[in-house]
Amino acid sequence: MTVARVLLPAPPGFNFPRTVLSHGWYGLPPFRAEEGALGATVATASGAYAIRLEPAEGAVAMTIAGRPTPSTRRELEAAARRILNLDLDLGPFHDAVRTDPRFAWIAETGTGRFLRGASVFEDVVKLVMTTNCSWSLTVKMVTAAVERYGEPAADGTRAFPTAERLASVPESAWRNHVRAGYRAPSLRKLAGMVARGEVDPEGWPTHPGPVVELRKRILALPGAGPYVAENLLKFWGRPDGLALDSWMRAEYARLFHGGRKVTDRTIGRSVARLGTWGGLALWFHLTKDWVPTD
């Protein structure tokens, strides 16, 4: 198969492994974690393409399976930059964590970017699918949605389904095939709203308005509660809240309190000096060991 190779400039100090392994998205389709690289399949206006991303000197190398047109290649370049959060300015976050000995390593290693989907829509759907359930169920739901409704690339892998495709899925299929349970009506309504252009979340990460306005827009989406909103804002480098879940609470208790249960207020106080960056610093500190070495 013909392949194209593109070099995407990366910001100084960009940490590829800590971005890829920043949270569980790397284990969900359409991503494929590979040795020292990340595979993904991305939908474009001219079809789906499989790509492979790997670190290069001062850049990220993207290999595209196929022969995309120049406009499609630009679409894939933009998607890859979004996936790796290459355009996020980590300066303010790193300036904050350098003042705290517990978290200074975050700045020293270039940590702070979250792996993201190729679209905001993908991230919203996946976050709704992580709410009030086990990770194994999240994997099953996302995998079923991609395998059933994602557009196939030439190599047989599939992209994350578009809002238009998911809007056409009946609620019964959301329940019986995707196994979305009580989320089925919300996910179908969410896809319909995006497909009809009633909401356009793709521009929200760079919206110049205040974070409180972004939070309100997210919370207005079907199925999106505070957990979804706070995690999306973390993805965008504009955190608001701690985005605590059961795993974070348990891991915090294990690391700092000998496993004894603590209140959310106690957790909040431990990072209060960092202001709005506290939840972001806490997440990366709790997951520090996910990447063995830097």
Image: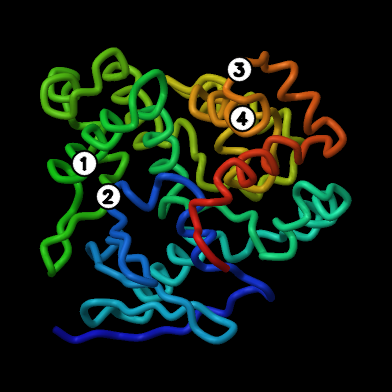
Q: Which residue is mark 2?
A: 29
| Tag nearer the camera, 1 or 3 | 3
What residue is drawn where x is 42% and y is 20%?
A: 223
Alpha carbon distance from label 4 to label 2: 28 Å
Secondary structure type for disc 4: helix
Counting residues from the N terminus, which is met first, the one under dot 4 or under dot 2?
2
Counting residues from the N terminus, which is met first, the one under dot 2 or under dot 1?
2
Counting residues from the N terminus, which is met first, the one under dot 1 or under dot 3?
1
Q: Nearer the viewer, residue 274 or 256?
A: 256
Query: Could you tell me the amino acid type at mark 3?
Result: Arg
Numbered badge on residue 143 = 1
Residue 279 place in picture, x, y as percent: 69, 35
Counting residues from the N terminus, which is met first, the one under dot 4 or under dot 3?
4
Secondary structure type for disc 2: loop
Q: Nearer the viewer, residue 251 or 221?
A: 251
The answer to whether 260 is drawn above or below residue 38 in the figure is: above
Alpha carbon distance from label 1 to label 4: 30 Å
Numbered badge on residue 252 = 4
What residue is drawn where x is 50% and y is 58%?
A: 291
What is the basis of the colouring in this image?
rainbow
Q: Is disc 2 in contact with disc 1, using a CB cutoff of under 8 Å?
A: yes
Q: Which residue is mark 3?
A: 260
Residue 30 seen in this snapshot: yes
Alpha carbon distance from label 2 to label 1: 6 Å
The answer to whether 241 is drawn above or below residue 71 in the figure is: above
